Amino acid sequence: MFKRLIACAFALLSFNLIAATHVHDEMGEFSIDQTPKRIIVLEFSFVDALASLGVSPVGVADDGDATRVIPAISDKIEAWTSVGSRSTPNLEIIASLKPDMIIADMERHATIYEDLKKIAPTLILKSRGESYKDNLSAVAKIGTVLDQEEKMQQLIAGHNERMDAFAKRINSDKTFLFAVSSTRGLYMHSPKAYAGGVMERLGLSSAIAEETEKAYISSTLERLVKANPDYLLVGEYGDETVVDDFKKNPLWNLISSVKNNTYVETNPKLWSLNRGMIAAEIMAKELQSIVK
């Protein structure tokens, strides 16, 4: 009888070990022994990934403003509880939601990783400053952890087919640049940034192709004139930003995109905050509509 109990216990332990899911995240090996249902995400790119699968997070670090998640994503999931800002999420609120998994960003949340782990298993992935390729890698890992690896791979394959189709339709030899503007300054997004990576994925040339060390590059008007993009897309945070000052300077009119009426004001929530497959395809659609 004792031997049978030992055998049963060993079999159960072996099953649990086999059933556990393992992925390599930014902290090393991440393991979880159940399919998570109550998920909290601490960056917008992770919301996009869950929405692609039709999975609703119970909590989101949405900076206290649910509208920062674009409708194309929020319409696919249920309402969530805000857990504060992405830079300093509220640990008490996170714990009160009783999550069985947290998805956090390496750059923002590595310093509170141990605190998050005390609340629930925490998957640390790249988000802030991530490239387009980094995002697809993170998306695949989220699919694996949610026990939907096959479905996620199908979604990624479908996404790639649509992006290929957009690339063929756009087919431009011009140079492109996306930048965000606020009262603090203007920041160009290099090919290493998400928006720059989406443009690169579509076969478009960056106006700052030589800038590969950083994702976001602070720029003066003179630096922007030097970059001289044929197409300039700017997302403005606020009614009055540094771009409004740039426009008052005669140098502004020297930029090719300004002279050719290919300067476009676009939504920074789409182009900068909500990184992921859903957002990327909307960005591609917008590019298709503006390229002449």
Image: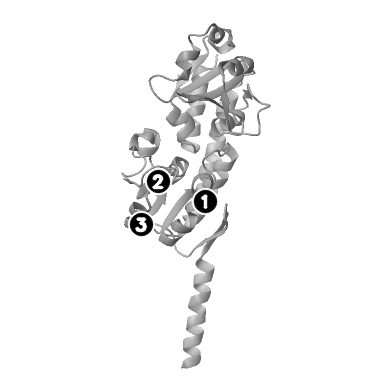
How dense is the environment of label 1, judged by Cα within 10 Å: few (below 14), some, or many (20 and up)? some
Q: What's the amino acid at mark 2? A: Gly
Q: Secondary structure at mark 2?
A: loop
Q: Tell us which disc is closer to us: 1 or 2.
A: 1
Tell me the SS state at disc 3: helix
Where is residue 288? Give x, y as percent: 52, 21
Q: Which of the 4 image quadrants contains residue 221?
A: top right
- Image location of residue 267, percent across then percent down: 43, 25
Query: In the rendered image of this protein, does residue 280 appear above or below residue 244?
Result: below
> Of helix, strand and loop, which one carries label 1?
helix
Residue 95 is tagged as 3
Measure the alpha-carbon separation of dots 1 and 2.
Answer: 27 Å
- In the image, taking residue 32 as reference, residue 255 lies left or right, namely right
Closest to the observer: 196 or 171?
A: 196
Residue matched to label 2 = 54
Residue at (45, 22) in percent of width and height: 266
- Comparing marks 2 and 3, which lies closer to the viewer? 3
How far apart are the alpha carbons under marks 2 and 3?
Answer: 24 Å
The kind of residue tagged 3 is Ala
Q: Earlier in the sequence, mark 1 or mark 3?
A: 3
201, above or below 1, in the image: above
Q: Is mark 1 in CB contact (under 8 Å) with mark 2?
A: no
* Mark before the other along the chain sequence, 2 or 3: 2
Would you call the spot at circle 2 few (<14 residues within 10 Å), some (14-19), or many (20 or more)?
few
Residue lying at the far right in this picture: please name it: 210
Q: Which residue is mark 1?
A: 110
Q: Is residue 184 left or right of residue 96?
A: right
Any part of residue 143 in sight = no
What's the residue at 45%, 24% (across, down)? Answer: 182
Q: Residue furthest front?
A: 184
